[in-house]
Amino acid sequence: MSSIGNIRTILKREISAYFSSPVAYVFIVIFLLLNGFFTFMVGGFFERGEAALGNAFFNWHPWFYLFLVPAVGMRLWADERRVGTLELLLTMPITPWEAIVGKFAASWLFLGLALALTFPVVLTVNYLGSPDNGVILTAYVGSWLMSGAYLAISCITSAMTRNQVVSFILSVVACLFLILAGFPPVINLLQALPGHWQWLVDAVTSFSVITHFSGFQRGVLDSRDVVFFLSVILFSLFTTSVILRTRRTN
């Protein structure tokens, strides 16, 4: 069987596993409820008086993903180890990389589906005004890329342990760093350092998902922001493959 065929088989297996249990439906419902509540009640959508989703809707996504994406990713490899199917999976005629890509792609598509189901918000803002739908689409692309970066990090923590709770906590901490690196209070604190420490401010903010996501929210499809998220994904999946190869060798 070709590599594409192996990846497709793993992808179908994972998608079926998601929707054969109520976990997927619970996740989607919670995600949609949080988006609706924070957009219209907390985000002040109607009070802003503007036909846009940037501040009221997309600003919350880095924080929603902080807990929801690790909850999706924590079971990817930890559950395989817990029930003893990881060894069986790695002895099959597939490479660890094919298994990683298949599992990651299935989970990322699932997150994309949850994100796509927020379309009533887009319909609402189009009904109430005349928004720039190009900006909204670009922000959606950025949000999906950001969720993929969170998910890839969760793959690492899930491969490290058989305990899903430990995996969840580790991935939340790692993703929280990526948020706080560009959080305004943290940036202001770093900018108070002497001038020769400016390189530290630049280095920290360069790892921030908020810094790179803000461009998408403005409708700017900057290649540097796309490369950042894709680099996080590829590096995290490569690290996951190293962990699994080590276990396969052992």
Image: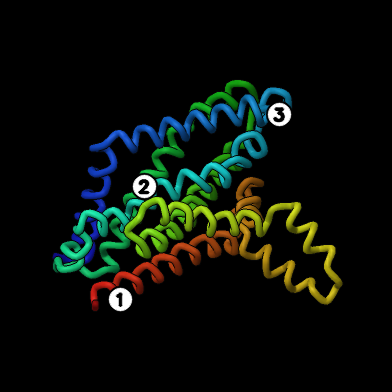
Q: Amino acid at mark 3?
A: Glu
Residue at 36% in and 52% down? 164
Q: Nearer the viewer, residue 81 or 14?
A: 81
Disc 2 or 1, which lies upstream in sequence? Answer: 2
Q: Nearer the viewer, residue 193 or 229?
A: 193
Q: Secondary structure at mark 1?
A: helix
Measured Cα–Cα span from mark 3 to mark 2:
31 Å
Q: Is residue 82 left or right of residue 190?
A: left
Q: Callout 1: 10 Å neighbours few (<14), some, many (20+)?
A: few
Q: Residue 50, which numbered label?
A: 3
Q: Closer to us: mark 3 or mark 2? A: 2
Disc 1 or 3, which lies upstream in sequence? Answer: 3
Q: Callout 2: 10 Å neighbours few (<14), some, many (20+)?
A: some
Measured Cα–Cα span from mark 2 to mark 1:
28 Å
Which residue is tagged 1? 246
Which residue is tagged 2? 109
Query: Quadrant of the rendered structure where residue 45 is?
Result: top right
